[in-house]
Image (spheres, coloured by chain):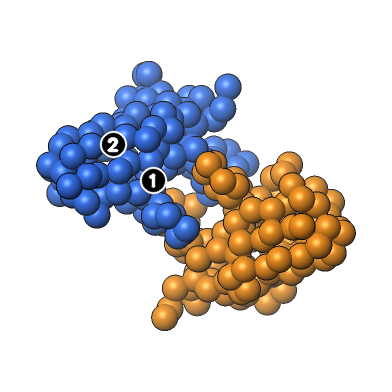
Chain colours: A orange, B blue
Amino acid sequence: DTGVSQDPRHKITKRGQNVTFRCDPISEHNRLYWYRQTLGQGPEFLTYFQNEAQLEKSRLLSDRFSAERPKGSFSTLEIQRTEQGDSAMYLCASSFTSAYNEQFFGPGTRLTVL
Amino acid sequence: RKEVEQDPGPFNVPEGATVAFNCTYSNSASQSFFWYRQDCRKEPKLLMSVYSSGNEDGRFTAQLNRASQYISLLIRDSKLSDSATYLCVVMGYGGSQGNLIFGKGTKLSVKP
């Protein structure tokens, strides 16, 4: 399967713990995006990378959130000191360099904070 | 006002029906528009881009009215397999170019 992959698919954690998610984009894609989706809502943009450079962060991305894409390939999203409000589906997408190219989404990581 | 607004539905229609979804967006400078489809507990997938001249892909027709900041999706001859949530999407403008701004989605249920 050469699509976008995410790991883990599900994560249950206790409030206050740190969690890290991984995204492997389609190999030729330069851009990688992170979105968050809560029940009954559309996905909300969090941040994106062009190669290894993080070009934009949403105001939704509090200082407890950090994302990296160290070699311009896979990316990680870390949430520190998780809160119940962080419970959501975290979606990763990738695309070619042009902003107008289709974004392909991964299956997501569903986070539940108890 | 939310950046992208759409009627959440649900729309419950019989097979073969024609159904239309509408969406409005707030940023008049927006340039790119899309409809994504999301099945239950799955990731969103691009259904079609929306062009100023309107565009058609089989049973699906998308239209854009820039003056009214309004986007529509028409599905003809609905199939059971069309049951899903349809997300209206606007691409961010200027410094946010490349980010997708999603509506809440409209849920469609096609019944036999």
Which residue is label 2 attached to? B12
Label 1 packing within 10 angstroms: few (<14), some (14-19), many (20+): many
Q: Going by the image, does B88 lie left or right of A17?
A: left
Which of the image's four quarters has the N terminus of chain A?
bottom left
Outermost residue on the front side: it is: B112
- Chain of the residue on which disc 2 is drawn: B
User: Any mark on residue A69, and which?
Assistant: none
Residue for point 54% across, 38% down: B93
Q: Are marks 2 and 1 on the same chain?
A: yes
User: Any mark on residue B85, and which?
Assistant: 1
Foreground of the two, B63 or A6: A6
Residue for point 56% across, 46% down: A39
Quarter residue A69 falls in: bottom right
Labels 2 and 1: the sequence-earlier one: 2
Residue B16 in the image, given as x and y percentages of width and height: 12, 42
Q: Disc 2 or disc 1, which is closer to the eye?
A: 2
For residue A29, above or below residue B15: below
For residue A12, above or below residue A101: below
What is the three-letter code of the residue carrying label 1?
A: Thr
Foreground of the two, A92 or B16: B16
Res A50 visible: no
Residue B33 in the image, given as x and y percentages of width and height: 40, 40
Q: Is mark 2 in CB contact (under 8 Å) with mark 1?
A: no
Cα gap from disc 2 to disc 1, whole angstroms: 12 Å
**Quick one: SS at disc 1?**
strand
For residue B92, above or below residue A96: above
- Chain of the residue on which disc 1 is drawn: B
Residue for point 61% across, 62% down: A110
Residue for point 41% across, 29% down: B7
